[in-house]
Image (cartoon, grey):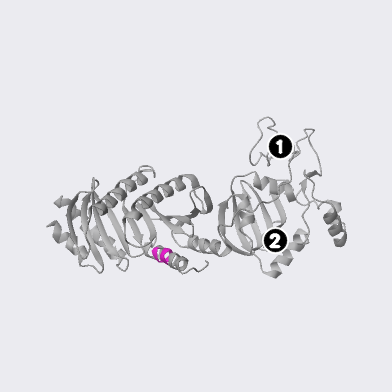
Amino acid sequence: MLKQILNKFLILNDVQAAIVIQENGEIIESMKSGIVIKEVLQDVISTIMLDSKKTAAQFGNASLSMVFVEFSDYFLILGPVMEEFYLVIIAKNTANIGQITYEMKKNQDAIVSLL
Amino acid sequence: MIDQLPEGKSIGWMQAPPQWIFTHTIRFIGVVRVVIQDGEGFILIKKGKALMYYFKHGRIELRGHAALDYFNSNPTIEFNLCKYTPEEFSQALKICDVEETMPEPAEVQEQEPARPAPAEIVEMPEEEQVISRSEQPPPLQPELSEPVTETPVAAVPVKLETPAPVQPVPTKPAVAVPVKPTTVVPERPFVPQPAVLEDPDIKIIGQIKKLNGIVAISVFNDDRNILLMGDVEIEPLLKIARTMLATTNKITPHLDWGSFVHMTLQIPEGNVIIAPYHENHLCILTTRTINIGHIRRILRDLQQERGQGVML
């Protein structure tokens, strides 16, 4: 069921992976296309999650809404789903970032219900 | 005097150490309007050369090196770079009564706003002024027009009727000391720092700041804030920006995704964005309603131009 939801992201133009992941880097579920999720990538995502959470806390304990990390070829969007669970989307830089974030918000409750 | 100056074309308000102004205005012709607490002043600049320093707080007027010393006594000052056309610049020179080739005199005056400038300046013919100023180097200590206290505080021995604008000296609470309370103010030759930002850079940063939803924008490096536009406390923002930068430094070597473009942290109150900018970094604070796509395009364009070796 979670795969079906993640697949909604994968059908978006130039999205390479949709992952539900824990803060410690453990992948709960993922859907990917043309990308291999190696351990190092899991570590990278984990670093972003943990660091961003701490950074957001510097704004008077603000909650983290979303994190974008963009490189010249790919970008990563990370949004908290619940507690230590995050939804991560990896896409080519030609992907529509607005569409992705819209889908993330739209499907958040459905993902939460499956965790 | 400030009100009489031509407006010029504002590039934008920013906060930076006073020395920044002199090292980043090599191609700038215009006026730098300075605001320090309740006082305001200006520096008339032609291509990096300061022709006139002026600051006024209440009835206190500082000119020349006294004003410069006061500017330098603040770690950072808030200012607005306003470009002049040749006509505006000529007009400003007339208003300031400055020949652009001569050094400005150091003076400290206490006077009523409507009171004319001291006779030695106002009544001298223009040519004599030039001779007089060029023959006499600016004094190391500002001169007094009206000493009103017996305390020989060389920096600014004048008495304020209003509260001291900045840095009151605890031992002399009744004396306004808008400059460092030293007994001798040594002549400080400018030692230009390596230019970090060029005039076009400032323009670009100013243009980004003007976008809807941009609260503040800072250019920073590992050591310090280089430029800030926007009304925010820089230190907390820099702390966050550096934390984000540390995160990107940790992850970038492990990703084969091309060069780093930006990292955006979204919280309910808004966004914090960091991005590389030449050898420095940008930190942008925005409202939640900002068009991220727009900012993203700008940051990508900046990086592409940098990659193509285009001088911004």
Residue at the farthest left position: A1
Q: Nearer the viewer, residue B165 or B310?
A: B310
Marking on residue B86: none
Instruction: Bin the neighbour count of mark 1 within 10 Å (Cα to Cα): few under 14, some 14-19, many 20 and up.
Output: few
Q: Which residues are magenta?
A: B296-300
Q: Chain of mark 1?
A: B
Q: In screen coordinates, is A114 left or right of A94?
A: left
Query: Which amino acid type is marked by label 2?
Result: Leu
- Badge 1 is on which residue? B182
- Badge 2 is on which residue? B5
The mark lying in front, picked from 2 and 1, is 1
List x then y, in percent, for residue B184.
75, 38
Q: Nearer the viewer, residue B145 or B275?
A: B275
Q: Chain of mark 2?
A: B
First in sequence: mark 2 vs mark 1: 2
List x then y, in percent, for residue B12.
56, 60
Task: Check the image and report above or below for A15 versus B120.
Answer: below
Asked whether disc 2 touches disc 1, contact meaning CB atoms under 8 Å apart, the reply is: no
Residue B79 seen by the camera: yes
Report how far apart the C-alphas of labels 2 and 1 lie in the structure. 32 Å
Question: Which quadrant, please, contains the N terminus of chain A?
Answer: bottom left
Dominant secondary structure of the magenta stretch? Answer: helix
